[in-house]
Amino acid sequence: MKLHAVEAGNFKLDGGAMFGVVPKSLWQRTNPADSNNMIAMAARCLLVEDGDRLTLIDTGMGNKQDEKFFGYYYMDHRYDLDSSLKKAGFSRDDITDVFLTHLHFDHCGGVIQKNGRDGYEPAFAKAKFHTNRNHWNWATVPNAREKASFLKENILPIQESGQLEFIEQTQVFERHTAAGFAILFVDGHTEKMMIPHITIKDKTFVFMADLLPTAGHIPIPFVMGYDTRPLLTIDEKTAFLNNAATNGYYLILGHDSAHEIITVKHTDKGARLDAVFTFSDFF
């Protein structure tokens, strides 16, 4: 088994939104803001090469939105799915499975592309698309808070394609043969976000999605303003980081433009950053 970073396009978000009630004087030490208070963000996806199975975890924003939309996020088009997949030696047609941690536009937008002027089609013609039923129901009938993040043009064509498969949850943490790895289900950021745990020999790599978007979010109170249940995020993040420090997990950061993979350690102040790695250190 081998893991590849797939860079789907850097962008920017408001620093205050990314750190909620935490003062800028604290979060800017790790995530410096520009003159518009925007901080650098990655749209880092993960490609899991496992025999004849090639699973892409998340897909970034995609490219079907208009320039006005991308302008809100200062999208950097130097990186995209196609060039990143090519760098890894693959193309879209090689992908057998697309696993979506959740259906916010910056994680699932690339799964659907435009077909002509008004239509949409799957961007991965030969793949199965994996989510879970609870999150699907949450996303297709969105609440007012998340409505701007759940875009129907990203979501509804997934079902219409006939390629959608639901991962059924019976426990909070379990291994799914349908996905090929263990999944932690969390509810603080959004309903039933899925955090994949991939074990290769003696190492466990965890794709953090929005449970830990950047290394700057390690301190427990550093919770995004985007989270629907921030107090639950605090509990979920505390439990996860303690477990990660104890077990030596390697955390793959989807939104950190400066850090690809990190580990954490126990300290008197709780879990803190331990070591920083790149994919080339392992693969």
Image: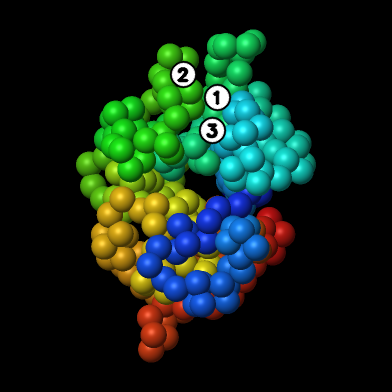
In the figure, 50 relative to 67: above or below? Answer: below
Q: Residue furthest front?
A: 35
Disc 1 secondary structure class: strand
Name the residue located 42 percent from the left edge and 37 percent from the top edge. Answer: 148
Residue type at the position of mark 2: Pro
Distance in Å between CA atoms under marks 3 and 1: 6 Å
* Residue 72 visible in the snapshot: yes
Disc 3 secondary structure class: helix
Q: Position of residue 153 (x, y in %)?
A: 48, 23
Q: Position of residue 241 (x, y in %)?
A: 39, 69
In the rendered structure, the answer to whether residue 281 lies left or right of residue 152 reads right
Residue type at the position of mark 1: Ile
Circle 2/circle 1 CB separation < 8 Å: yes
Residue 8 vs residue 57, the one in the foreground: 8
Dot 2 corresponds to which residue? 157
Q: Mark 2 or mark 1, which has the lower sequence index? A: 1
Distance in Å between CA atoms under marks 2 and 1: 7 Å
Dot 1 corresponds to which residue? 112
Name the residue located 26 percent from the left edge and 59 percent from the top edge. Answer: 232
Residue 15 vs residue 152, the one in the foreground: 15
Q: Residues within 10 Å of mark 3 (few under 14, many from 20)?
A: many
Residue 131 vs residue 201, the one in the foreground: 131
The part of the image, by quadrant, that contains residue 120 is top right
Dot 3 corresponds to which residue? 109
Disc 2 secondary structure class: helix
Circle 3/circle 1 CB separation < 8 Å: yes
Residue type at the position of mark 3: Gly
In the rendered structure, the answer to whether residue 107 lies left or right of residue 193 reads right
Q: Position of residue 266 (x, y in %)?
A: 41, 81
Q: Tell how many labels.
A: 3
